[in-house]
């Protein structure tokens, strides 16, 4: 199988993807031209897959399920055997549509999970979906990506498509995939296909089905773009090809940097509106009635998750290496980084207005997930808020029905209270509200600081 794409909606079906130019795919792990395994190998070892997904986290697993749902034979690779067991037991945090896909997939012989990278040699295409975080100094942690790419390059066979989907710096596809493959004697566009197609997974929401979210694809060569197009086109309704992998890489950085800058802007507007005693949400909603040239963003306690706090840092890191700057982006990321401290200072001020000191005050944090309806703490502003409040001497507890335990940076474990109405705090900070969560008990609290800007009809509610 290889790749002839249709941009106009005529999607090739699995097993019928033929490359333009007549390049035949080889699935022989030894390179001998024999696609069958030795007699001592298991039946799974002999199977051929349409696509292998490297990394089965919050992006990789939904991606694998999407390919399987489209009719592909899917190999899911993750070096963490505990993660594979969790997936097999279906104990994973997925939106409802993906939960249903997982139920179907784990019972299907066309969906195979493995921790053995040698199995990649038996797949027509390989998609890399590993995390690309930043460290405590906001420097890209390329370790997981470099390790995954090295393993994929080692096991790439002639005719394969290798597609990177992880958000990263511009030129990464060339540096970590195309160049090493050339060193092995595999020329992109001739012997193998190499492309970048950024993921667009939105955890915790069913608002956009995977197939309805357009995908961008950019290859190292035009033939590589066609190959990626053919793979992705069967899973989504619209694919947007671009001229180069670097264009696709930069497009993803623009998407999330755009969000970061606008979040910083609306947070600043929230501070201005607070000073002028104006409801910022009413201001945003009014501006959003303009049918063109405006996109609504709402303020909050900061940003979390893997994308917005991290992705712009990859761009800034690359610019620093080239001795260039991006002042607007840098200012925006600095404002975002300071937002949790702004929440703590607002708590101190609110308590002071009632004659209370922060030291010894009981503060309850409602919701610690970085966004509604996810069991995800990554980069959540709530963690920094909790730690800062503890440092100020307050007695901090939290309630989150989706996250039973939080581990702070000093190793302290804090368990969620089971009944927030029984805590009797001096002040409640509402950080995240999950769908359907009861908020009536907040009416009986002495003071509520609402960082979600969703509580308008309760007494004693303050905003940032």
Image: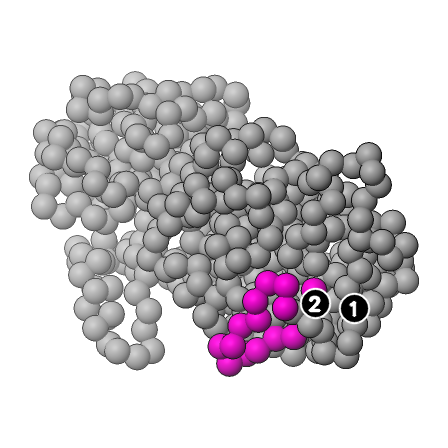
Q: Residues within 10 Å of mark 1 (few under 14, many from 20)?
A: some
Task: Identify the secondary structure beneath mark 1.
Answer: loop
Foreground pick, 68 / 433: 68
Q: Main secondary structure of the magenta part?
A: loop
Specify whether residue 170 is in view: no
- Magenta stretch containing residue 3, yes or no? yes
Q: Residues within 10 Å of mark 2 (few under 14, many from 20)?
A: many
Foreground pick, 431 / 272: 431
Which residue is found at the position 51% from the left and 81% from the top? Answer: 8
**x, y percentage for residue 223?**
72, 76
Which image quadrant is residue 261 in? bottom left
In the image, residue 451 sits, relative to residue 81, either above or below, namely below
The stretch of residues the image draws in magenta is 1-16
- Magenta stretch containing residue 137, yes or no? no
Which image quadrant is residue 417 in? top left
Horizontal side of 54 relative to 28 (left or right) equals: left
Task: Identify the secondary structure beneath mark 2.
Answer: loop
Residue receiving disc 2: 2
In the image, residue 456 sits, relative to residue 221, either above or below, namely above
In the image, residue 174 sits, relative to residue 407, either above or below, namely below
Horizontal side of 349 relative to 243 (left or right) equals: left
Which residue is found at the position 61% from the left and 75% from the top? Answer: 5
Q: Give the color scheme: rainbow, by chain, secondary structure or one colour.
A: one colour
Q: Which of marks 2 and 1 precedes in the sequence?
A: 2
Discs 1, 2 touching: Cβ within 8 Å: yes
Residue receiving disc 1: 24
Q: Which mark is residue 417?
A: none
Specify whether residue 28 is in view: yes
**x, y percentage for residue 157?**
81, 57
**x, y percentage for residue 251?**
56, 69
Rounded to the nearest whole Å, what is the CA distance between mark 1 and mark 2?
7 Å
């Amino acid at each position: 199988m290889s790749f002839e794409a249709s941009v106009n909606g005529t999607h090739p079906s699995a097993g019928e993807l033929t490359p333009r130019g007549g390049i035949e795919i080889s699935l022989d792990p030894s390179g001998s031209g024999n696609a069958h395994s030795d007699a001592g190998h298991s039946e799974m070892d002999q199977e051929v897959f349409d696509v292998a997904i490297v990394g089965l986290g919050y992006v990789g697993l939904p991606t694998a399920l999407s390919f399987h749902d489209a009719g592909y034979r899917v190999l899911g690779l993750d070096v963490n055997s505990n993660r594979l067991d969790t997936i097999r037991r279906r104990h994973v945090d997925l939106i409802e549509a993906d939960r249903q896909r997982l139920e179907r997939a784990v019972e299907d012989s066309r969906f195979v999970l493995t921790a053995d990278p040698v199995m990649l040699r038996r797949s027509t295409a390989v998609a890399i979906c590993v995390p690309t975080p930043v460290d405590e100094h906001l420097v890209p942690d390329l370790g997981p990506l470099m390790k995954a790419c090295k393993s994929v390059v080692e096991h790439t066979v002639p005719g394969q498509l290798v597609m990177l989907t992880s958000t990263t710096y511009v030129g990464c596809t060339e540096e970590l995939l195309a160049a090493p493959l050339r060193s092995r004697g595999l020329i992109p566009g001739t012997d193998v296909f190499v492309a970048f197609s950024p993921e667009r997974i939105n955890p915790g929401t069913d608002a956009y089905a995977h197939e309805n979210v357009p995908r961008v694809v950019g290859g190292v060569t035009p033939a590589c773009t066609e190959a990626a197009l053919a793979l992705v086109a069967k899973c989504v309704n619209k694919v947007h090809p671009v001229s180069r992998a670097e264009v696709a890489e930069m497009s993803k950085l623009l998407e999330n940097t755009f969000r970061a800058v606008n979040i910083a802007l609306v947070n600043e507007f929230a501070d201005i509106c607070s000073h002028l005693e104006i409801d910022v949400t009413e201001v945003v909603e009014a501006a959003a009635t303009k049918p063109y040239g405006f996109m609504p963003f709402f303020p909050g306690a900061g940003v979390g998750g893997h994308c917005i706090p991290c992705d712009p840092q990859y761009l800034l890191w690359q610019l620093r290496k080239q001795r260039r700057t991006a002042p607007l982006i840098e200012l925006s990321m600095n404002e975002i980084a300071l937002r949790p401290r702004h929440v703590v200072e607002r708590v101190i001020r609110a308590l002071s207005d009632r004659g209370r000191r922060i030291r010894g005050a009981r503060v309850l944090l409602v919701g610690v997930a970085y966004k509604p309806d996810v069991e995800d703490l990554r980069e959540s502003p709530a963690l920094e808020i909790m730690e800062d409040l503890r440092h100020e001497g307050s007695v901090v507890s939290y309630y989150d029905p989706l996250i039973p335990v939080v581990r702070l940076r000093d190793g302290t474990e804090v368990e969620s209270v089971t009944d927030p109405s029984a805590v009797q705090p001096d002040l409640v900070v509402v950080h995240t509200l999950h769908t359907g969560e009861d908020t009536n008990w907040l009416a009986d609290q002495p003071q509520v600081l609402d960082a979600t800007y969703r509580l308008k009809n309760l007494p004693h509610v303050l905003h940032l």
